[in-house]
């Protein structure tokens, strides 16, 4: 009778011999389901992050290729002008250079979106100006001017070599390559999400390191026109306030 009353009542079933098995089964199902759901969400989040990193990296790789191609096409054309190449060979190099210029202007923006996703708005706009403004004003425009002057000299029988020396073509090409390397290293770091995963102190230290490197790597080897110099100094003055 006592044994029967022991198993009766609200919690009596807990004393049943099979109770531990039932409880274990229920707990295993609940905990197992929760863990499965947790790891599924974690895996999905990791996959989304990896997809974002890959998309950013592809965009940066594209910008790097565009910038490198632009410099290489300019260098090839300048070399041809220096050797006084004429006719179809020169026309082909001119077309390749112009096509590279158009691609850079039209396709640079998508790569910069990678930076926009992880940088504060004010910092992003200054960084974008460095890529699309300073790099273009300090290197691409002077190279374009140098090419135009060299073409004019070739057509009129002037000294192409003297023009190239005056516009410091070789220095422009070399320094443009250094600038691209510095910009792309920073963009790759941004694309990989390396910056956003650290605390503010580390981020500020990295920003200063990249700022110092870019100040050297992207320094123009030639004098800037007044309007270009003003445009280039704007972001630099803003950075000094950070």
Image (cartoon, rainbow, N blue to C red):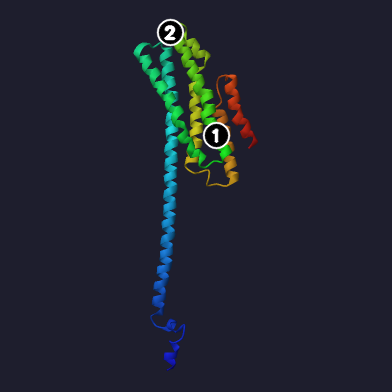
Residue at x-position 44% and y-position 44%: 52
- Residue situated furthest top in the rendering: 157
User: Dot 1, how many residues are within 10 Å of its Cα: few (below 14), some (14-19), or many (20+)?
Assistant: many
Residue at x-position 51% and y-position 25%: 136
Q: Is residue 191 visible?
A: yes
Which image quarter: residue 5? bottom left
Q: Dot 1: what SS? A: helix
Taking the image as shown, residue 73 lies to the left or right of residue 216, namely left
Taking the image as shown, residue 180 lies to the left or right of residue 242, namely left
- Residue situated furthest bottom in the rendering: 1
Q: Dot 2: what SS? A: helix
Mark 1 near mark 2, Cβ–Cβ under 8 Å?
no
Q: Is residue 162 above or below residue 205?
A: above
> Label 2 belongs to which residue?
155
Q: Position of residue 163 (x, y in %)?
A: 50, 11
Residue at x-position 59% and y-position 41%: 204
The Cα–Cα distance between marks 1 and 2, rounded to whole angstroms, is 40 Å
Taking the image as shown, residue 111 lies to the left or right of residue 238, namely left
Q: How many marks?
A: 2
- Residue situated furthest left in the rendering: 88
| Picture quarter with the C terminus | top right
Residue at x-position 57% and y-position 36%: 209
Which image quarter: residue 26? bottom left
Q: Position of residue 24 (x, y in %)?
A: 41, 73
> Label 1 belongs to which residue?
127
User: Dot 2, how many residues are within 10 Å of its Cα: few (below 14), some (14-19), or many (20+)?
Assistant: few
Q: Earlier in the sequence, mark 1 or mark 2?
A: 1
- Residue situated furthest right in the rendering: 241
| Picture quarter with the N terminus | bottom left
């Amino acid at each position: 009778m006592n044994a029967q009353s022991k198993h009766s009542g609200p919690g009596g079933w807990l004393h049943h011999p099979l109770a531990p098995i039932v409880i274990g089964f229920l707990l295993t199902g609940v905990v197992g389901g929760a863990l499965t759901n947790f790891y599924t969400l974690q895996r999905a989040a990791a996959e989304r992050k990896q997809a974002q990193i890959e998309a950013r990296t592809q965009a940066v790789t594209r910008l790097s290729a565009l910038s490198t191609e632009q410099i290489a096409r300019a260098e090839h054309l300048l070399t041809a002008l220096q050797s006084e190449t004429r006719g179809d060979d020169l026309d082909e190099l001119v077309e390749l250079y112009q096509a590279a210029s158009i691609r850079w202007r039209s396709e640079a923006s998508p790569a910069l979106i990678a930076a926009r996703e992880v940088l504060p708005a004010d910092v992003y706009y200054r960084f974008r100006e460095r890529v699309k403004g300073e790099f273009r004003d300090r290197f691409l425009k002077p190279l374009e001017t140098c090419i135009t002057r060299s073409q004019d000299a070739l057509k009129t029988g002037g000294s192409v070599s003297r023009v190239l020396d005056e516009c410091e073509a070789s220095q422009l090409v070399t320094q443009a390559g250094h600038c691209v390397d510095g910009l792309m290293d920073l963009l790759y770091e941004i694309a990989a999400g390396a910056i956003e995963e650290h605390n503010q102190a580390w981020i500020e230290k990295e920003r200063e390191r990249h700022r110092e490197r870019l100040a050297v790597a992207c320094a123009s080897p030639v004098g800037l026109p007044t309007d270009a110099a003003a445009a280039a100094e704007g972001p630099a003055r803003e950075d000094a306030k950070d």
